[in-house]
Amino acid sequence: MELQTKIPSDAAVYIRDAYKRFAPTQIVLNGLSLTIKERTIYGLLGASGCGKSTVLNVIAGRTELDSGTVVVKTKKRSNLGFMPQTLSLHEQMSVYENFTFYGYLFGMETDAIRSRSEDLLKFLELPSGHRLVRELSGGQQRRVSIAVSVIHDPHILILDEPTVGLDLLISKSIWEAFLRMTQQGKTIIITTNYIQEARHANTIGLMRNGVLLAEDAPIKLLERCHVSSLEDAFLLLSQEQEKEIEPGPFPEEIKPAKATFQDDSVFTFQKFKGIMYKNITLLKRDYTFIVVQLIIPIITAFVFNMVIGTKPKNIKLAVLNNEISLSHCLNYTVTSCFMDEYDIPTLSCSYVNYLRKEHYQFIEYDNQEKALNDVRENKVWGLLNFPHNFTRSLAHKVTEGINANDDFVTQSFVETWVDLSNQYIGSFIKYDMMRVIEPFLQEALLVCGENPRLGSQFVEFEKPVYGSPDENFITYASIALLCLGCFFFPLLSTALLAYIEKMEGIMERIMVTGASTIEMISSLILIQIVAHVVQTTLVMIILFWIYDNPLRGGVVAISILMLITGVSGMFHGFMLAVLCDTIFLTGYGAAGLNFALCLTSGLLWPIEGAHVSLRMFNWLSPLSYTVDAARALCIKNFPLTHYLVIRGFSSAVTWCCLILLIIYVSMRHKKGRLEIQK
Ligand SMILES: Nc1ncnc2c1ncn2[C@@H]1O[C@H](COP(=O)(O)OP(=O)(O)OP(=O)(O)O)[C@@H](O)[C@H]1O
């Protein structure tokens, strides 16, 4: 009540004893007090970095004081107009489109926006409203920015260096426009580094060291200081401050104070509509973005299927066959029993032919040292050395069993050297050599009239519980790829879109209109979801229908899971854009996250093989449980009630909520800072 009586009735803005610091030693406002009268121009002057923009942010309700009082006469944000220091316009949009976007944010109807736009174009001497902002000159762009801040005809206009970088003629015409506005009843607060141009203001506040050195009409200031220019007055007052004023102690007790507005809300359709309008207009203008967003995942899916999972073919192996020349082995079939005394076949041929069916290429050698040398020189991947009486020794071993002669036993082995430096190829060679032993022996035994199962290993694999006998790596990896793609591409596009808005100061400008985090994120996500659904559908068609990776059930469930995963990716992207203050960090953050998820989602290697410390915390990865659930749905056709599926869905939803919370907190924390600092 006492305060109310102190506030002059004609004050549009009243600040008393304002203290603000951004770090313990970085005090920006140190007991500043100012009064801005209605229907006047108030010029806030001071050296760069003295805190002028901070004062404007305090008035606009974007920065909270650590202590003090701030009263803004209007209780509605829609009565405030704010022009940030950076251009903060969508340069790919036309002048009209920028007007419409901000008009919608303030709840204006399209017709009202159109007629107000025409007035403003004339008033600020702007060219056609159909021109794109990026095609205008620097001065015209600044005037568009001013027009945007007054599109909704606010009572109080806050302008952060509106004439910076403009030539004298344009600055003059802008000041004239401001004077006309005050005659129409507006209150204008301007910061400027050009002290001399501020002589047009009704009141000047000279700011230094977090306080006002003086606050008066320009003419009175000149009289008081007995000087002829405002620069001299500023200099004189600064010298006096240095002599006289010791900065007071920063209040020990923090009593946050901020300008509040009644029309701040969590979600309003009108603001959502405005942001949607802007997003759709931008997408229509830049369709390459949509094309890239669709083409890259499609190419990735095709390349993945063409590269991953297919067995390496035409691997070269050296053969030293002491039993028979390899040239005699082509088209060789076993027609006689290898255990006969007389008509003995050559099983080395048969074995090599089995391997040929697995797409190995054989090169015959007659010298073991030379062959091994070629393995060492990478000309071939391995050497198979068949002893001269390999078939007879094998027959002896089979018929004699435990009574077999040691020499025969030794001669019944194919000596093999494999280059294991390439783990994948080396393992394929070993695996195939072991795998063909069984059919090779069974065929030989069958010709002998023996039970072919004598040639089987002692382990017999029944029909697989899940999967099929010819399941390969791609079955396992394709699901992880789907999840990763659904997460990463929306993450990347959201991070870039949001970062650009932040970088250009547009995010901050939107927030000053009172738009909430929810409105900004929901409209961005609605747009992205359309792209995400199309993207995911195409990738699923490629993976499951064109390349026939197994999809044994749960199409609807997997689609919903991928939708949530995409939304989670978008939230992660938005979070990166809010938290990172350079494009480098944002890009690296996105790429690094993708890389880490590749490794921890089981795309490259089963997580069961990871170090115990990683396995313990793997559940912290946003995709681990999602990938498990997706595999359970696609490969095992588990029902929705299975715990793996429930866990996957719960994890995806929890991550969304958690990241949303982080975004909300950081946007609150970064108030007044959602733009890249100059
Ligand atoms: N949100 C923030 N977090 C940390 N530091 C901040 C924040 N906002 C402003 N600052 C710092 O406070 C000081 C005053 O900044 P401010 O932008 O208000 O100065 P200014 O007088 O408007 O400068 P200029 O004329 O160059 O625009 C600067 O050192 C700036 O880096």
Image (cartoon, grey):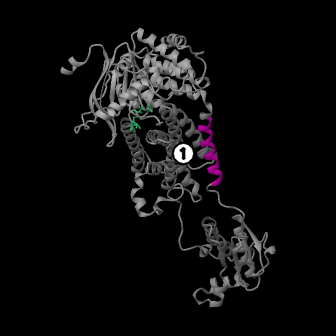
Q: What residue is drawn where x is 30% and y is 13%?
A: 10
The location of residue 474, given as percent across then percent down, is 58, 54
The N terminus is located in which quarter? Answer: top left
Assign ligand 1 to one image quadrant.
top left
Q: Is residue 71 above or below residue 640?
A: above
Q: Is residue 66 visible?
A: yes
| Disc 1 target residue | 485
Query: Which quadrant holds residue 207?
Result: top left
Q: Main secondary structure of the magenta part?
A: helix
Taking the image as shown, residue 62 lies to the left or right of residue 196, namely left
Q: Is residue 111 left or right of residue 287?
A: left
> Image point 59% across, 85% down: which residue?
401
600 over 515 or under it: above or below: below
Instruction: Identify the residue shown where x is 74% and y is 84%.
Output: 388
Q: Nearer the viewer, residue 536 or 138?
A: 138
The spot of residue 648 in percent (x, y) is 42, 47
Residue 165 picture location, percent across and down: 54, 26
Q: Is residue 21 magenta?
A: no
Query: Of 609 and 212, which appears nearest the observer?
Result: 212
In which quadrant of the rendered view does residue 191 lie?
top left
Q: Which residues are magenta?
A: 291-307
